[in-house]
Structures are given as structure tokens and as C-alpha cells.
Image (cartoon, rainbow, N blue to C red):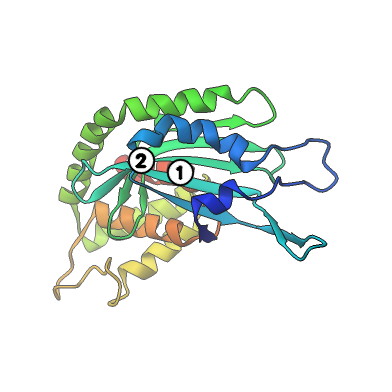
Amino acid sequence: MNTIKLDELLSSKIYVKENASVNFKSPRHYLQPFLDIIGPDVIDYRVDVTSPVMNQDEGGAMNIAYPRINVEATVGNQMTGFYSVIGFIFALDTQIPIAKVYTGQSVRTCLNLTIFNADDVFEQNLLGNSQEIYTRALTFKNNKIRQIEEYSKIYKSMTENMLTRKSLNELLGKLLLRGGRSKLGTSPVVGASKLLTDNKSVYYTEKSGEFECSEWNVYNSVTQSLTDSADPILKPNKTIELAAIIREN
């Protein structure tokens, strides 16, 4: 996964899928309606891309196309310790090309994505009428205040729900078992367990010399593993799966 500037993405070339009958549009074509909807409220953008396709023209200039992108816009910071974000994703090299929008909070210190509600992610097949993706982006923008109120309550509950060593082990075991049968997978949970037991990690459970760990610490250690992963396409969905499993307790 590489981070680039928004202008670089907007000026990149059209992605051509080998042996495919479909013709894709330029990144600007897919992104501009989204940018127009949220633009007036944006503080900044973060653009992550994967699997760039590069070739050189006869004049020596490099042409770059990106089959997978994630544009995340920061639209406020009304929730203490978080940035409020709305994201746009497209994946053109999958069997069914998709576009996805999501709304959530990003932890300021590490930029880990936080999404608690399944209704805060919307996905659509890019081969059909994709207008609903932009309609949903506008809905997400208009509902930000409501989301912040809801998320603040959930965050408070997770930070106050302290775990014992036994309940931490039980929760990690549950995440492994359930993760293997869901989009979450097991790799982020294994990564989180390493962070929780590494005395150099901010998620270490014995920083004060005694065991101390909240549900939020576990949640954030797993989302750290998702942030560090190579492909951002499934990150919103995995984040939702994670929240659902933890909040079952």
C-alpha cells in the first residue's frame, strides 16, 4: 500500500484490465462526484493505492494506473481524540469491480479506522448504475452529527469496560474463532495479540507494571493491524465485523 497525493491520483491513467470486455473510466470520473459532495467540509485527504500498473510512452514519460484506491477525507474533529472521516474506495481488478463509501472516525494518534455500525458502509457494483454510491455519500455527510453522538457513547463504554487476563484471553479466542468464519480473518487478531504483549507497543497491557486492558485497547490493537495491512479495500468491512464481535459481550 502506498500513500500518494490526491492530484497524483486524479491525473493518473485509465486502468485497463487484461482480457476483460469492460472499459473503465478515469479515476477522476469516479471520484469527482464524491469530491464535489464532501469538498466544502474537507480538512484534508489521505489517498492510499495498491497494485499500480506502470508503463513508459515513446517520449519517456511514465504512465501510471491504479486499480485499487482508498480516498479518505477528514471532515471534522468534533469527537475528542478522533478525526471524523468519509471514505471512497474502488477496486477495478476484482472479479466484480466495486465502489464503496464509508463513514467513521479515525483515531488521531494512529489513524486507525473506527466503524461501529454496518449501515455506515455501502458497496455497489461499478458495472451498473453507480449513482447510489454518491447519494449515500451525501447521506453520510448529513448524518455526521448523529454518528458522532452514537460513536461517543460506544467509545465511552468500550474504554470503561476493563478486562481481566482471563477475559482478555477469552475475547482473543472468540475473535480468532469468529474471525476465521468472517471477513475479519485471523491475521489481524494474531497481530493484535503480539501488540498487546509487546512491551514496546502502545497497546501493551502491563505498561504500569500491572495488568490493565480495556475492550477499546483490544479493538484498537486489531484495527492497528488492519491499518498496517497491504490492502485497504476490505478494511471498513473488517472493522465492522470486529466491532460486532467485541460488542456482543
Q: Which residue is mark 1?
A: 236
The residue lying at 66 percent from left, 58 percent from top is 52
Q: Is residue 63 left or right of residue 230?
A: right
Q: Residues within 10 Å of mark 1 (few under 14, many from 20)?
A: many
Q: Nearer the viewer, residue 94 or 173?
A: 94
Looking at the image, which is closer to me, 165 or 226?
Answer: 226
Task: Name which residue lies at 43% across and 57% down.
Answer: 227
Residue 11 is left or right of residue 221, and the answer is: right
Residue 183: x and y in percent read 52, 45
SS assignment at label 2? loop
Q: Residues within 10 Å of mark 2 (few under 14, many from 20)?
A: some
Q: Quadrant of residue 64?
A: bottom right
- Measured Cα–Cα span from mark 1 to mark 2: 20 Å
Which residue was labeled with disc 2? 42
Image height check: is 135 above or below 154?
above
Sequence-first tag of 1 and 2: 2
Q: How many marks?
A: 2
Q: Residue furthest right?
A: 19
The disc placed on residue 183 is none
Q: Check disc 2 and give the amino acid type.
A: Val
Q: Is residue 40 left or right of residue 159?
A: right
